[in-house]
Image (tube, rainbow, N blue to C red):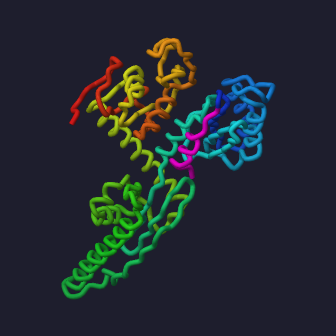
Amino acid sequence: MISHADVEKLRGMRAPGRSVLSLYLPVPLDPAGLRGLAARAGDLIAGVSAVRLDGGSTAGLSYADRDAVLDAVAAHGREWLGHTVAFFACRQLGLFEALPLPCAVPERAVLATRPHVRPLLAAVQRCPDYRVAIADRRHAWVLSVSGNRVDTVARQSGEGPRSPSFGGWYGLEAHRIQQRIIGLARHHYREVAAILQRSAGPAGNVPLVIGGHHDSIAGLLQALPPAARESFAGSFTADPHTLTPARIRELASPVIAGWMARRERELAEQILGGMAAVGLRASLAAVNEGAIAHLLVAHEGMIPGYVCGRCGALSTGIDECPDWGTAARPVPDLLEEMVQQTLDDNADVTVIRDAPFSVAAKLRFPVTGGESVTRGDQR
């Protein structure tokens, strides 16, 4: 399972010239689709650079890197059915990685001075590790889901009450049994909630999905302490005793996807409601001034641009940097460069879907450049 540590490892690599290949390749779920996969990978690679014939140049894609990717596709395609695989290759840096991603990202090939990590970051953010609690009135299972892996963290079995079908005079015995059932169920849910509290991890914010019957979901949710309830992502209904790990993941995955989409919308609304830069021009100005607190960037699309060879300022035109006379270096994607610079400044980055902008940012302080800067409450 990929993590933020994998992103940071790749971000630390840089070549003298544009010789680092990043390829995001969706692998079809149907094995029959593998026949054309290597050809598709070759077309994407050919679209970003002509293969160089000698090994002395510091720029361009080598035959070795192209062949390493195509060989990996041929050898391991069946292992990656239904996944998007991220390839990073640069013989000059001794780099070759093939990382199956936990969720789909659009196909893309980029040749740059360092790995293109924006889609990788999107996959890490969009498909987090999460927990699933499955419960009925007597039993519970707490599971940890990481990618395709589902592990059982804990099991809980409560005391079984007598059957409510045995009633005494005027149903008084049945009433007492029913109250005992309710009391035991509450105690059981509190114990499960305590297990969830202990398994939340140091940060305490691992998303939680609850599955089971309607009454069990409501009972467990009511027993959760406030901190654990904040991590509740949603629920699904099912008979706990018919569930397998694969089925649990199948039912929980869309719950997590919907929760992530809601969080993205809420984050965008929160940022745009304050002191923000909206749009490419305003956001570039904010990045160049180091004013970004939280960058929101679209997960699709690429915008070519330039970086100043002297001060590192990003721009859409070759003559926009105030350090005139210094050669501007073209970059294949300004959005990627903005992500990299924001992370270098120890600020936050979120890759979002379905946004009405290509890029926006929450600001630390007002910036002087850009026409689309919105100043909100600065407190």
Residue 365 position in % (x across, y down): 29, 31
Q: Decide if residue 48 is on the left or right side of residue 187.
A: right
Q: Quadrant of the C terminus?
A: top left
Residue 321 position in % (x across, y down): 46, 16
On screen, residue 228 above or below 328: below
Name which residue lies at 33% across and 70% down: 189
State yes or no: residue 4 in magenta. Answer: yes
Residue situated in front as seen by the camera: 372 or 378? 378
Residue situated in front as seen by the camera: 85 or 49? 49
Q: Decide if residue 292 is on the left or right side of residue 113.
A: left
Residue 356 in sight in this render: no
Name which residue lies at 65% across and 40% down: 28
On screen, residue 345 above or below 78: above
On screen, residue 305 above or below 109: above
The answer to which quarter of the image holds residue 97 is: top right
Q: Decide if residue 176 is on the left or right side of residue 228.
A: left
Name which residue lies at 80% across and 25% down: 53
Q: Decide if residue 80 is on the left or right side of residue 197.
A: right
The answer to which quarter of the image holds residue 331 is: top right
Residue situated in front as seen by the camera: 266 or 57? 57
Residue span colored magenta = 1-15
Name which residue lies at 55% across and 40% down: 120
Residue 171 position in % (x across, y down): 21, 82
Residue 193 in sight in this render: yes
